[in-house]
Image (cartoon, rainbow, N blue to C red):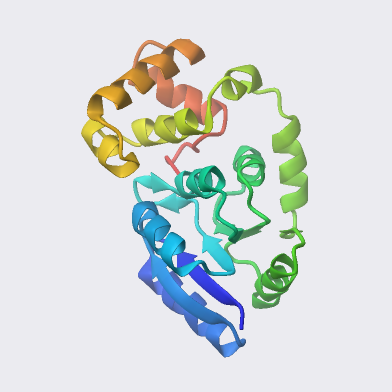
């Protein structure tokens, strides 16, 4: 039986997904709202598949994708999110996601995506393929974005969402001083002098949207 782990910051969404998946013959082995908790569970449980939202309160699903890639964990991932930003689709694929669906997709499409991904295929939801092409070929801030490491992109999102250096350090197992060093290096790379300008850069390049997601 295919085992699945759920990451979403809304309990009602996780409950709905669990009911749908279990009634369709899948085993839901765990769930979390927080990337740090999820990573610990994923290392322990080693499910076949991860269903992952990108917007996790003040955190980001990209944090978890980055860690899964860095640790080479053999867990297939489908991103299930509200974000239809081309940049987010492209970044998720770059970080190893095997599928990308928008919330609101029909039940049948989600089940088809799961079936495809567990067989080693990729699945992009309706209209997502065009978003992926747009995101992968966009020139908007491309040189500056490409100069950032996955860790730096992870930190920039957390900074612009208002998290302090101690909070970021705790989440990423870094010292606040190391986070401050990252912050300074990021600002130098993208050519901004303060957090307000960094927020504008993140929105312009699609790292976050205007609502901070």
- Work out whether residue 163 can be spotted: no
Front residue of this view, candidates 158 and 139: 158
Q: Is residue 20 above or below residue 31?
A: below
How many numbered marks have been drawn onto this rendered protein structure?
0
Q: Horizontally, is 65 left or right of 106 in the view? A: left
Q: Horizontally, is 20 left or right of 135 in the view? A: left
Q: Quadrant of the N terminus?
A: bottom right
- In which image quadrant can residue 146 be found? top right
- In which image quadrant can residue 157 be found? top left
Q: Is residue 199 above or below residue 35?
A: above
| Residue at 43% in and 41% down | 211
| Residue at 66% in and 71% down | 110
Residue 184 in the image: state x and y as whole percent.
36, 15
Q: Horizontally, is 205 left or right of 137 in the view? A: left
Front residue of this view, candidates 131 and 182: 182
Residue 182 in the image: state x and y as whole percent.
37, 22
- Work out whether residue 3 can be spotted: yes
Q: Is residue 161 above or below residue 26?
A: above
- In which image quadrant can residue 23 be found? bottom right
Residue 142 in the image: state x and y as whole percent.
65, 22
Q: Is residue 105 above or below residue 16?
A: above
| Residue at 42% in and 29% down | 156
Q: Quadrant of the C terminus?
A: top left
Front residue of this view, candidates 26 and 53: 26
């Amino acid at each position: 039986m295919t085992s699945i782990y759920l990451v979403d910051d809304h309990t009602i969404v996780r409950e709905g997904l669990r009911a749908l998946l279990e009634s369709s013959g899948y085993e839901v082995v765990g769930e979390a709202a927080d990337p740090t908790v999820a990573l610990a569970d994923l290392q322990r449980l080693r499910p076949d598949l991860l269903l992952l939202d990108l917007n996790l309160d003040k955190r980001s699903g990209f944090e978890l994708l980055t860690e899964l890639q860095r640790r080479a964990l053999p867990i297939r991932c489908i991103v299930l999110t509200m974000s239809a930003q081309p940049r987010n689709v492209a970044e998720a694929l770059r970080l190893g996601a095997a599928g990308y669906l928008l919330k609101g997709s029909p039940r049948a499409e989600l089940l088809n995506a799961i079936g495809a991904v567990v067989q080693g295929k990729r699945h992009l939801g309706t209209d997502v393929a065009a978003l992926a092409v747009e995101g992968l070929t966009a020139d908007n801030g491309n040189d500056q974005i490409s100069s950032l490491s996955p860790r730096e992109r992870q930190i920039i999102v957390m900074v612009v969402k208002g998290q302090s250096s101690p909070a970021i350090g705790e989440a990423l197992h870094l010292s606040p001083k190391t986070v401050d060093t990252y912050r300074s290096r990021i600002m130098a790379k993208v050519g901004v002098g303060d957090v307000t300008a960094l927020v504008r850069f993140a929105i312009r390049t699609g790292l976050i949207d205007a609502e901070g997601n």
